[in-house]
Amino acid sequence: MSVFNRLLICFVLISVNAFAQKEQKASFQVVPLGIKGGIDEKNLSAYLVGPANTNDFIALDAGTINAGIEKAIENKVFKVSTSEVLRKYIKGYFISHAHLDHVSGLIINSPADSSKTVYATEKCMEMMENHYFNDQTWANFGDKGPGTPLKKYHFQTLNIGEETPITNTTMTVKAFPLSHVNPFESTAFLIKNGESYVLYLGDTGPDTVEKSDKLKSLWTAIAPLVKSKQLKGIFIEVSFPNEQPDQFLFGHLTPNHLMKELHTLEDLSGKGTLKGFNIIVTHLKPPTKNIIKLKEQLQKQNDLGFKIIYPEQGKKFEL
């Protein structure tokens, strides 16, 4: 083989490798502030998500905020103070539903926070206004609702299925309804940045148990994004191991139910489309032995070949 041909082959290999690395470039960065369901008030559902290489984050749910930021600083994810992350890096909050394990961090940290937007669907926003930011349970830091609004937060109601720009970021959001002990509703948020997407689901039960078609409708909406590889990952809860009876799921998923739902998604997006796809498992409920069992079951049942990501509090990862 001539020197020229060898150089040509090397050039082609380098070019292919560079192209592959470009293709794999992260679209989003994620900093989990809280990852669990249950009783650990220092580690409840809250995920900072933002475009890669920026400090423009949104909080997807807000069960734990301060303790999660402190953990991230310990892990050298952030090199500024807790206050600066809270006030400057978090551009807004997206609340999937008004259960306390998803909003308590927002409420408790509101006196120290800066002005920004809180996003939720109409029913969720009404619950937060009437039961939390109502000038009785807590001061009304919003710009509407009972008592005297302090107007620190702008309460923005999201219309289902409507793409909405996220203030002070390059991202947009589209909300979808979920069933969390029917007829109580939770929310899924489809976040878009450029041509890339990530999907976050609040608490949800399986369609079969909830007597609902909300997950099927969500899978139908996002299937084209899975097929085109624009969707970079799905945050979805799995709260209990398979031993939990359906009548005691209380609007949550098990590995069995998750797999059934993801098979439905694959049927809609095409065979093999979930192989290597990022599934970020959220809301695991203590005790530890149940979490260990749940992870073992999910690993064993993963016949679709998706990549399972178990977030760790305060440890950044990319999608």
Image: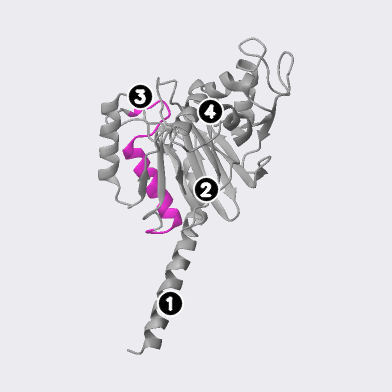
Give whichever of discs 3 and 4 has the lower sequence position. 4
* 5 or 103, nearer to the observer: 5
Residue on which the image places disc 1: 12
- The image's mark for residue 28 is 2
Residue on which the image places disc 4: 62
Give whichever of discs 1 and 2 has the lower sequence position. 1
Secondary structure state at the residue bearing disc 2: strand
Q: Which residues are magenta?
A: 246-272
Q: Disc 2 residue type?
A: Phe
User: Is residue 182 visible from the viewing direction of this image?
Assistant: no
Secondary structure state at the residue bearing disc 1: helix
Mark 4 vs 1: CB contact within 8 A:
no
Q: From this view, report whether residue 105 is shown above or below residue 270.
A: above
Quarter the N terminus occupies: bottom left
Q: Residue at x 40, y 33 (%)?
A: 209
Q: Nearer the viewer, mark 1 or mark 3?
A: 1
Residue 255 highlighted magenta (yes or no): yes
Q: Residue at x 65, y 43 (%)?
A: 169
Secondary structure state at the residue bearing disc 4: loop
Residue at the farthest top position: 136
Marks 2 and 3 sit apart, C-alpha to C-alpha, by: 35 Å
Residue on which the image places disc 3: 248
Give whichever of discs 1 and 3 has the lower sequence position. 1
Q: Nearer the viewer, mark 4 or mark 1?
A: 1
Q: Nearer the viewer, mark 2 or mark 3?
A: 2
Marks 3 and 4 sit apart, C-alpha to C-alpha, by: 25 Å
Give whichever of discs 2 and 3 has the lower sequence position. 2
Packing grade of label 2 (10 A; few <14, some 14-19, many >=20) is many
Packing grade of label 1 (10 A; few <14, some 14-19, many >=20) is few
